[in-house]
Image (tube, rainbow, N blue to C red):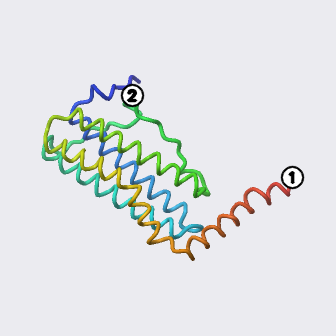
Amino acid sequence: MAKKRFKDLSEREILALAIQLEEEDSRVYADFAEGLRESYPATAKVFEEMQAEESRHRRRLIDIHRQRFGEHIPLIRRQDVKGLLERRPLWLVRPLGINAVRKQVEIMELETRRFYEHAMKQVSDASTRKLLGDLAEIERQHSDFAATLEKKELTLGARLKEEKSSKGVFMLQVIQPGLAD
């Protein structure tokens, strides 16, 4: 299937893609929270908050799409557009490695911010440009948001408990199976 170049997307298609990307990010954060809940409950709480934030972004994008283009939102996914990175399905791997998850989050936030910055340049409608600019700024702040949530949720005790749990998971998955060989 042919991919459409980003610069050839219409404003409606850009909004539809932004909605889809926010939906994807929201689901990934929910999956991270679910996958980390047992071993890393405080970190799971951080991802639940980030999931809620992405859902709010999606609702704002849907509202502006409705105002400008009506109820029908075309299905445009990242794999339909040249230049958007394919994501490794890290969130499907169980159990999740906490460091791999944190690295994936950094990549996701950077990628989403860059999307909004590029999209803003292609849109002529002032209200849409403003929203895309606002969302780009929010994505810039998400690193701070995650750090703030992490500080709030990951007290020293919680962090020590998670580190201990991580060592236990490593022992059960890597060391112990190796001894059975």
Q: Amino acid at mark 2?
A: Lys
**Residue under the point 51% across and 74% down:** 155
Instruction: Name the residue rendered at 24%, 34% in the picture.
Output: 121
In the image, farthest residue toward the top: 2
Tell me the residue at 70%/66% (across/down).
Answer: 168
Res 49 quadrant in image: bottom left
154 w.r.t. 11: above or below: below
- Asked if residue 94 lies left or right of residue 32, the reply is right
Q: Are marks 1 and 2 in contact (CB under 8 Å)?
A: no
- Label for residue 119? none
Helix, strand or loop at mark 1: loop
Specify the quadrant that holds the N terminus: top left
Which residue in the protein does label 1 denote? Answer: 181
Q: Residue at x 27, y 36 (%)?
A: 119
* Residue at the far bottom in the pictured view: 157
Q: Which residue is mark 2?
A: 82
Vertical comparison of 58 with 48: above or below: above
- State the SS at label 2: strand
Q: CA distance from mark 1 to mark 2?
A: 46 Å
Looking at the rendered structure, the kind of residue marked 1 is Asp
Q: Is residue 133 left or right of residue 125?
A: right
* Side (left or right) of 154 relative to 175: left
Tell me: residue 178, above or below residue 18: below
Near mark 2 (Cα within 10 A), the count class, few <14, some 14-19 or many ≥20, is few
Q: Earlier in the sequence, mark 1 or mark 2?
A: 2
Q: Foreground mark, 1 or 2?
A: 2
In this view, the residue in front, 27 or 102, is 102
Residue 155 appears left or right of 115: right
Based on the displayed image, in which of its 4 quarters is residue 76 positioned?
A: top left
| In the depicted structure, whether residue 58 falls above or below residue 42 | above
